[in-house]
Structure formats: structure tokens, C-alpha cells
Amino acid sequence: PLVSSTPLLQAARQNGYAVGAFNVHTLEMLQAVVESAEETDSPLILQSTVGTVKHLGADYLAAAAATAANRTRVPIALHLDHCTDFDTIVQCIRAGYTSVMIDASMHPFEENVAQTKRIVDIARAAGVNVEAELGKVGGVEDDIVVGEHEALLADPQDCVRFVELTGVPTLAPAVGTAHGIYKGDPNIDFERIRSIAAAVSVPLVLHGGSGIPEEQVKRCVALGMSKMNIATEIRIVFSNAIKEVFATNPDENDPRKYMIPAKKAVKAAAIEKMRMLGCIGKA
Ligand code: 13P
Ligand code: ZN
Ligand code: NA
């Protein structure tokens, strides 16, 4: 069965590695990251955006993820990424999600606390993990758009108060990464990661994982990040592999002929991230 992501992330935090959390949009993408985890003996977090829940259905996603979890010995959690609305969170928990993100980071601190606490109380009863965001991660993720100048880093003392007031079991503090591919190098505030990790004991989540150079990913993990979200990069490799098939064979009409290479590309990309995060062999 699917497991809560809380123990996976606590183990990561205690042992100095991070778990990869991959946003999937199709059955093949889901299978690809599951195979990556299986082959490398890695714990895994499957994620879906709210947009993909609307596109495929929480029940279909939960059924596919549960099937994967039941077929394998590596622990797998299913997480709802960046959700701003209460009803979708409840719907996903009912469908079998084992982790949810309440993203109220666009609201003032007190409102973020209130919304997060409400979800923490519901999720605790269901044995479901909760992630919340403090500060504002820049870039575009699904329907959430945060411009470069709106992005805001999380304050370590706010993190302490936020965790105390909400009881949230995992926290995503904005530390300078952004959703999507970076124009230059990301501008990560490593000192801030160090102070937040020293100030709170809950596992920390790094958003905007696509495009961060390997050396910087490793530094983030060494400083205390326990989960990294990866969305854009696997969408790109998946789509590029399909484009390549059609470039050489525009008349291809067997979905397996383009899905198999797409799946292979995602699998290789996911293994590469797992290696950087240090979670290989930790299942
Ligand atoms: P990227 O699209 O940069 O990988 O960010 C993923 C993310 O943070 C999803 O929540
Ligand atoms: Zn994110
Ligand atoms: Na990114």
C-alpha cells in the first residue's frame, strides 16, 4: 500500500539524504519514476498537481499509485502538490493520497497559519502528511504564477513560529529556487537553508528542483533539505522523446511506439536526480 511521506522524510532528514518527489501527468510517467525507484532501491514520492487531478481524476491517480505501491517493495507515497483549496485536499485524501500540500503562501502569515492548521488537523486523523510553504517560491507551477520580484524568501524565525502554531510535519521554505528552468544559475540562499534547518526539526522541502546544478543540489541536501520536487525537467524529457519519434516518423499512430521512448527518458532523468539526492539504496 501507499505509505505516508512523513516517515520517509524523517528518515531522510536524520540520515542526510533527500527523497525525490516527481510530478507525473500520465500513467507512463508514473510507471517510469516507479521503475527508477525500484531499480535503484530508492524511496519515492509521486506527486500530482491540482491541474492533473482535474485532468485525470484523483481516484484514477490514487488507484495507479496504489497499484504501483502494491507491486513493489520500495516505499511509495502519493502527494498532492501546491493546492490552494480545501475541497480538493479533502477529495484527494478520500481518494487515497497519503500526503498533501496546502499552499497558502500567497496570504499573510496569520492566514497561512490558519489554513495550514485546518488541514493539519484533518490530515492527522487520516495518517496523511502535510506540507506547507513559507515565503513565496518564484516561477510558474500549474495555475500558480509568482513573478521574479514577488518571490520572497522565508524567514527562519517565522519558520519556527509557523511550525509551532500549525504542527505541520513538513515545511517548504522559499530559499531562492524557482519553478521551471532557470535563466542563469539559481540564486540559492544556502546560509538561509542552514539556519532554517538549525531552527526547526521537521523535514524541509526544496521546490523548483529542475535546472539546479548538481553541486548545488548536493549542498542543499547537505544543509538539511529532505525532499526535492522535480516537475519541469521530466516533462521536457518526456515530451522531447515523443517529438523525436514524430520527427522521424510523422505518421506514427501506435501510442506504445512513442510512449516507450518517453518512459525510458523519464526513467533515466529520475535516476539521475535520485543519485544527486543520495536516496539510492535507502528504500
Ligand atoms: P520544477 O518545475 O522547477 O522542477 O519545480 C517543481 C516543483 O517545485 C513542484 O512543486
Ligand atoms: Zn513547487
Ligand atoms: Na526549477
Image: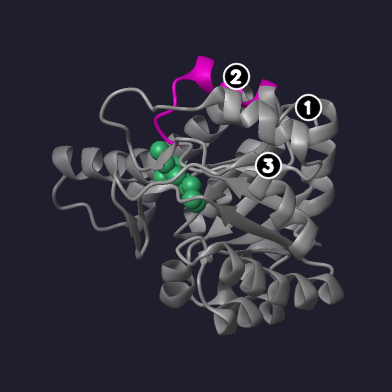
Cβ atoms under marks 1 and 2 closer than 8 Å: no
Look at the picture and state if 233 lies above or below 279: below
Q: Is residue 260 visible?
A: no
Q: Main secondary structure of the magenta part?
A: helix
Q: What residue is shown with label 3? A: 204
What residue does disc 2 label? 219
Q: Tell me the CA gap for discs 1 and 3.
A: 21 Å
Mark 1 or mark 3, earlier in chain: 3
Report how far apart the C-alphas of labels 2 and 3 lie in the structure. 14 Å
Question: Which quadrant would the C terminus be assigned to in this image?
Answer: top right
Identity of the residue drawn at 39% across and 50% down: 259
104 in magenta: no
Residue 160: x, y in percent?
73, 48
Going from N to C along the chain, the mark reached first, 2 or 3, is: 3
Is residue 35 in sight in this rendering? yes
Residue that carries the numbered disc 1 in the rendered image: 281
Amino acid type of the residue tagged 2 in the rendering: Arg
Task: Identify the amino acid type marked 1.
Answer: Gly
- Residue range (magenta): 210-222
Q: Of the residues tagged 1 and 2, which is closer to the observer?
A: 2
In the image, the residue with mark 2 has its CB under 8 Å from the nearest atom of ligand 3: no
Which residue is located at x 68 percent, y 36 percent?
196
Q: Is mark 3 within 8 Å of ligand 1?
A: no
